Image: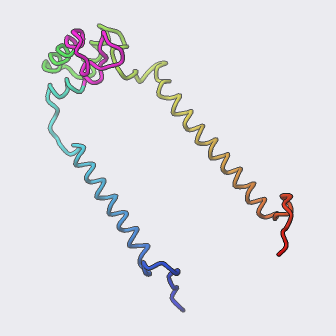
Amino acid sequence: MAARAAPVGDDRGPRGRHGARASFVLALVVLTVALVIGSGVTSSAAPSAAQRAAALDTQIRCPSCEDISVAQSSASSAIAVRREVASLAAAGESDRAIEQRLVAQYGPSILLSPPDSGLSSLVWLVPLVAGILALAALGAFFWRRSRSWRRLRAEGPEAAGVPEVGV
């Protein structure tokens, strides 16, 4: 049995494809490990009260501003909310309890992200469904187009109304 020759211009040799695949897999593994280490997933230390307060400040809307967080605002109402969040976090309140307390004081619009329940969950669901439907419609369009192209190629140029050019 004769060995298959590599295509002309392919200087990778018989093991070239496997080597390329192995180096791609190795690059993915290195990238994954770097992302896991860099993200801090492996650190076991709990965030301090100041870190929790800073994270919450980015998720809470400034009461007197439009669409910016209390962390970004220098308004007096934002400073008051930041102080309240810091004191509640230092007192040991959970993030959820702090958010609920602020919602009770200022209303649900104090949170920059919409709640995950009720009618406002449609804010997240509708774009997801619309995206899936758009991808399905695009896939169906290209699938039908490829079928018609294959059919036209199989019928030949005379079926498409193109005159045959003699040589």
Q: How many marks?
A: 0
Q: In this view of the protein, which residue sits in the foreground, 42 or 3?
A: 3
Of 94 and 103, which appears nearest the observer?
A: 103
Magenta residue span:
56-81
Q: Quadrant of residue 107?
A: top left
Residue drawn at 40 percent across, 67 percent down: 21
Residue at the outermost bottom position: 1
Residue 122: in magenta span: no
Q: In which quarter of the image is residue 56?
A: top left
Q: In this view, does 136 lie above or below 110?
A: below
Give the residue displayed 56% in from the left and 33% down from the top.
130
- Quadrant of the image for the N terminus? bottom right
* Residue extending farthest top: 105
Magenta stretch: helix, strand or loop mostly: loop
Q: Where residue 33 sits in the image (x, y, percent)? A: 26, 54
- On screen, 161 above or below 67? below
| Residue 66 covered by magenta stretch | yes
Query: 68 or 144: nearer the eye?
Result: 68
Q: Residue at x 76, y 63 (%)?
A: 153
> Picture coordinates of residue 88 (x, y %)?
17, 16
Give the percent coordinates (x, y) of residue 55: 23, 27
Colouring rule applied to residues = rainbow
Q: In this view, does 77 lie above or below 148?
A: above
